[in-house]
Image (spheres, grey):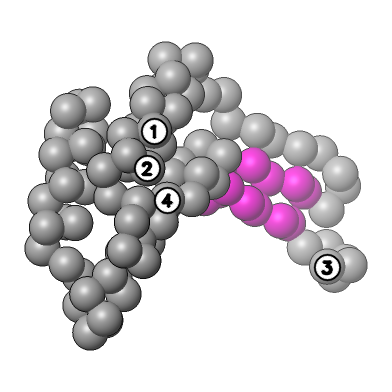
């Protein structure tokens, strides 16, 4: 961005670059990365259809589904599937 003196933060604040060039990257355990990969796979196989999609985002996974039923409202079936995936892996 080229703004002098600006601290950049990305990946939900887990990666930071300070104005002096110093970098901070939050350490994430391999176990978390493995669970995240499993979550991504589970979500893709259960909710990624009819307009819903899953997007890996480094240290998190985003699921887009609000347009699935065409009204802009969240489809209850997709929401239940999301909850089941998250619950099976201990996220909720």
> What number is the disc on residue 85?
none
- Answer above or below: position of 6 versus 85: below
**Can residue 83 be seen?**
yes
Marks 3 and 1, how far apart in space? 34 Å
**Residue 90 occupies quadrant:** top left
| Quarter of the C terminus within the rendering | top left
- Look at mark 1 in the image and give the residue it sits on: 41
> Residue 80, image x and y in percent?
11, 51
Mark 4 — residue? 54
Give the Cα separation between the discs numbered 1 and 2. 5 Å
Region in magenta:
7-18
Q: Nearer the viewer, mark 4 or mark 3?
A: 4
- Secondary structure under badge 4? strand
Eyeballing the image, is 2 above or below 88?
below
Asked if the residue at tag 2 contacts the one at tag 1, i.e. Cβ–Cβ closer than 8 Å, the answer is yes
C-alpha gap between disc 4 and disc 1? 9 Å
In the picture as drawn, the residue positioned furthest to the front comes out as: 50
SS of the residue at dot 3?
loop
Image point 19% across, 56% down: which residue?
78
Mark 2 highlights which residue? 44
Q: Which residue has dot 3 on it? A: 1
**For mark 4, does the 10 Å Cα neighbourhood hold few (<14), some (14 to 19), or many (20 or more) residues?**
some
Counting residues from the N terminus, which is met first, the one under dot 4 or under dot 3? 3
Using the rendered image of the protein, determine whether residue 63 is visible from the camera's viewpoint. no
* Camera-nearest label, 3 or 1: 1
- Mark 3 vs mark 2, foreground winner is 2
């Amino acid at each position: 961005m080229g703004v002098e003196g600006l601290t950049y933060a990305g990946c939900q604040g887990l990666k930071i670059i300070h104005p002096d060039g110093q970098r901070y990257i939050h350490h994430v355990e391999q176990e978390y990365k493995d669970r995240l990969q499993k979550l991504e796979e589970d979500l893709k196989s259960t909710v990624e259809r009819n307009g819903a999609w899953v997007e890996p985002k480094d240290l998190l996974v985003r699921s887009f589904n609000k347009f699935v039923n065409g009204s802009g409202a969240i489809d209850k079936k997709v929401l239940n599937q999301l909850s089941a995936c998250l619950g099976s892996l201990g996220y909720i």
